[in-house]
Image (tube, rainbow, N blue to C red):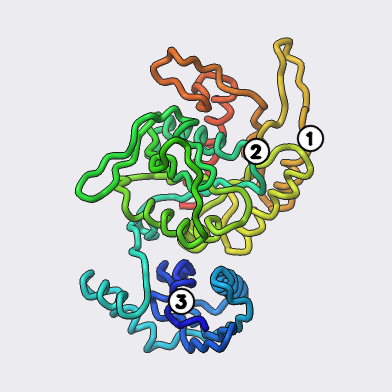
Amino acid sequence: MVTKEQVFDALKHVYDGTYNRPLTELGLVKDIMTKDSRVNLTVVLTEDSETLKSQYRQDVQEGLGRIGIQDVHVRFRTITEAESQEIARRLQEPQGESNQRQQTQSPATGRSELLGRDSGVTFIAVASGKGGVGKSTVTVNLAVSLAREGKRVGIIDADIYGFSVPDMMGIEDRPAMDNNKIIPVERFGVKVMSMGFFVEDNAPVIWRGPMLGKMLRNFLSEVNWGELDYMILDLPPGTGDVALDVHQMIPHSKEIVVTTPHATAAFVAARAGSMALRTDHEILGVVENMAYYTDKTGEVAYIFGRGGGAKLAEELHTEILSQIPLGAPDNHLSEPDYSPSVYKADSETGELYAKMARRIIEKLESQS
């Protein structure tokens, strides 16, 4: 029979949006009853929202499903004034007392200063419905373009199974350590962290969902990022564990959805966009990658069809940020700043990315 400790451990990745801490750490998972393969529990809401209830129910069922519990009943009630005061008191405790309390109640992960709303960092998650649409290419070129505009930018390569950012940016160095903090590698003015830095010989990563969430939180809390304006997160394709963790850990993040012009790719990408909308995340826009191909004569061919990006943007009630042509940077190994995937600022595609970066800056600064 499953134990209460196992239930707490399975739910430690479910975050409360008000305090930006795990529900289990805040004591907001109560009345746990286990019998055979059935679990009943109560989730205490800091915000009475039907959307939130639906998301919590899904998160709890998925978390317990990972440990083999399929029969789950979730009740909800609104937080009391006394419980709010107790949480406020607990959050004001010295770190040592807080850690001791966490160890006696449930496993929990520390909060990163980056995640505070007053950190000044804008999080932008780059998502796609499926692999192979150039999501990581869009991520690195958007980050570099923002840096060229004078912004302080970081990238978290959150595609932990399919990490590619270090290779795409031509990074050969590894992170250093300073005062027990990891120092990210900087390239083209962008600070980068990736699972790829910790894997030898391109070995596969064979992890379960909770371990992925832990690594992502470590990238946020155990890395000395310094001062940033933008943090770009290259999400895995689809709507799996890491995407869920990002939406829970960073409830105020923005999102860009990448697709190709093909109707099926846009249809699948709509799922990633719908997930962002369901969790009240703002979609900045759609990037239609591989939108067209221009040959040496200047003739344009629409290899993957037309209209997928526009249809997706209409469905998600947002705009097309850019239509990027099919191609690869004209970079050479002999160049001191060689990278396989970063376009030069004065190239045609580099200028498209620069225009997109300026549009994003304009949108975000108009909201502040």
Residue 331: % across, % down: 51, 17
CA distance separating discs 1 and 3: 50 Å
**Label 1: how many Cα within 10 Å (few below 14, some 14–19, many 20+):** some
Residue matched to label 2: 132
| Residue ID for mark 3 | 6
In the image, residue 281 sits, relative to residue 165, either above or below, namely below
Secondary structure type for disc 1: loop
Residue that protrudes farthest toward the top in the picture:
297
Marks 1 and 2, the one that precedes in the sequence: 2
Q: Nearer the viewer, mark 1 or mark 2?
A: 2
Which residue is found at the position 50% from the left and 21% from the top? Answer: 344
| Residue 306: numbered disc | 1
Residue type at mark 1: give it. Answer: Arg
- Circle nearer the N terminus (1, 3): 3
Query: Which labelled disc corresponds to residue 336?
Result: none
Q: Position of residue 30 (x, y in %)?
A: 46, 86
Answer whether residue 153 is visible to the viewer in this image. Answer: no
Q: Is disc 2 placed on a helix, strand or loop?
A: loop
Question: From the viewer's perspective, is the residue at label 2 or at label 3 nearer?
Answer: 3
